[in-house]
Image: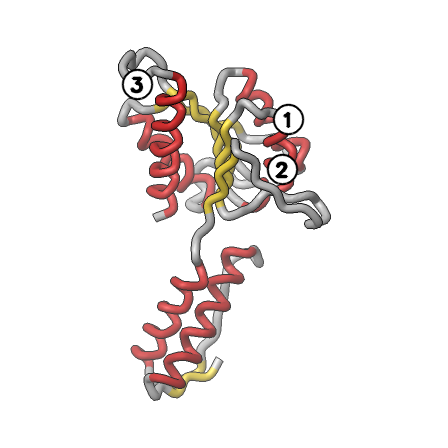
Amino acid sequence: MKKYVVVLCVLLLLGSVIFAQGQADTGKKLLKVGMVTDAGTIDDKSFNQGTWEGILKAQKEGLVDAKYLKPSGTTEADYLKEIGNLFDAGYKFIITPGFKFETTIYEAQDKYPTAKFVILDGEPHTADYSIFRIEKNVVAVYWAEHESGFLAGVAAALQMKTGNFGFIGGMEIPAVQKFNWGWQQGIKYANEKCTTGVSM
């Protein structure tokens, strides 16, 4: 689902960029879309892969020219370096998959004011979380993981009726935590409203 949201974001921003540049009728230039991966690989079956597949879908439809770069490390400096490399190569529409890019995009949005950034599952902020700021050249995309977690909790409780439930997430990151909170609330709701007897 996330990769289709990425495609939608690319298409929406692509339309605004083409309109602004007056290239809608010429078809001579494709929007150069870059992506910087996080610590994982491009085929990690997670954030990187889903994001890249969405970008590739737009490329296969002839809408963009796509490229990704994998940083040598996982620091803000490593991420900024690859953003700079993409920018210098003409990829001024840059997508970053995940909250690990929050402080990086906070810096990049000022350092590269003519670039367009998309950050998934995050909001640009300072390292100490004291300032959150999204400039006009940034789109922050969020998902309501707690809502899907809630529905999963209700569905599981209705299916099993009684029993002891637990939750095993992936990494302890905001998206997984939000799903867990929704899951617990879904079970609680089913117990209160649907007469199930599930304990956590």
Task: Give the amino acid type for the residue marked by disc 2 in the picture.
Answer: Tyr
Mark 1 vs 2: CB contact within 8 A: no
User: Along the polypeptide, which appears first: circle 2 or circle 3?
Assistant: 3
User: Along the polypeptide, which appears first: circle 3 or circle 1?
Assistant: 3
Q: Residue at x 38, y 37 (%)?
A: 9
Q: CA distance from mark 2 to mark 3?
A: 31 Å
Task: Give the amino acid type for the residue marked by disc 3 in the picture.
Answer: Ala
Above or below for 7 versus 1: above
Q: Residue at x 35, y 86 (%)?
A: 196
Q: CA distance from mark 3 to mark 1?
A: 28 Å
Q: Residue at x 43, y 25 (%)?
A: 33
Instruction: Point out the frontmost of discs 2 and 3.
Output: 3
State the scheme by which the image is colored. secondary structure
User: Badge 3 is on which residue?
Assistant: 24
In this picture, residue 46 sits left or right of residue 39: left
Q: Residue at x 48, y 33 (%)?
A: 95
User: Badge 1 is on which residue?
Assistant: 111
Q: Residues within 10 Å of mark 2 (few under 14, many from 20)?
A: many
Q: Secondary structure at mark 2?
A: helix
State the image coordinates of residue 36 (x, y, percent, origin top left).
Answer: 52, 32
Q: Give residue 159's quadrant in the image.
A: bottom left
User: Badge 2 is on which residue?
Assistant: 106
Above or below for 10 versus 63: below
